[in-house]
Image (tube, rainbow, N blue to C red):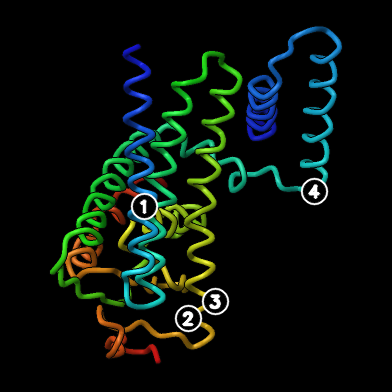
Amino acid sequence: MMLDWVSGVLLLVGSFLLLTGALGFLRFADFYARIHACGVTETLATSCILLGLLIQSDSAVPQFKLLLILLFVLLSSPTSSHALAKAAWNAGVRPRDNRGKQPLPLPPGEH
Amino acid sequence: MRYTFGLVLALSVFWLINSGHYDALLLSLGVISVGAVTLIALRMDVVDQESIPLHLLRRIPFYLLWLGVQICRSNLDLVRRVWLPGQRSTPRIARLPLPQYSDICRVVYANSINLTPGTLTVELAPDHLLVHTLSAEGLAALEEGEMSRRVSELEQ
């Protein structure tokens, strides 16, 4: 009963964070800022939802599998966002300010 | 030798966790598959310090704990920026020094930057990182260098 409450709260918080990621993705101004918004979805939101599901399950094997899923998501998502950012950088996409109007000043040596 | 042993141990635990059936037939099939994967890995010559970083095992739990706290904090910061109106964040892009010399610690550092929402590694060069941050405070925290120092401590 108590565990059901904990699990429910975790699932709710996770869903709220998913919504936050989606809203940030729409609200932020440029490509790089939008990747940051996806960061919420792939770290804390995923953790909350998987932990909530883990509490719901009552046998060990699915619980370990959920932990493995969490581990793989946490290892692969930063790599994929780096791949996206690097591909965009190489394609000539440059970051802009928070309104998406002015290009940001680049560090010396970059162009 | 110890890396081979570590690989066998990790594969066995992985198999046992995923199987859930522990009768003689399935266990022997598990032993065969662990043996086959180990042999293939040895023949491919990928069993070494880089693929099985045993030397990190002792320190990495503390680092992960610290990283988890940082991830929660930066998530909260980003939630505030998304929901509250009038948050004027000023994105920055800058170079950071890269003092770590082993490949695995560089990957840990770059991935840790990516895992904390609000900071993103754009490029990984031999001597520096190019990072994009959503706010000036995020960049200041990275430049202050606590994460870099903690990753460097992993490889000692």
Task: Say which residue appears at 42% left-offset and 47% top-offset.
Answer: B155
Alpha carbons under labels 4 and 1: distance apart: 45 Å
Q: Is residue A102 visible?
A: yes
Q: Is residue B51 left or right of residue B97?
A: right
Alpha carbons under labels 4 and 3: distance apart: 30 Å
Q: Residues within 10 Å of mark 2 (few under 14, many from 20)?
A: some
Q: Which residue is mark 4?
A: B44
Q: Do marks 1 and 3 share a subunit?
A: yes
Task: Say which residue appears at 35% left-offset and 11% top-offset.
Answer: A1
Looking at the image, residue B11 lies above or below residue B154:
above
Q: Position of residue A70 (x, y in %)?
A: 50, 38
Q: Position of residue A48 (x, y in %)?
A: 38, 36
Q: Position of residue A95 (x, y in %)?
A: 36, 82
Alpha carbons under labels 2 and 3: distance apart: 5 Å
Secondary structure under badge 2? helix
Residue type at tag 4: Met
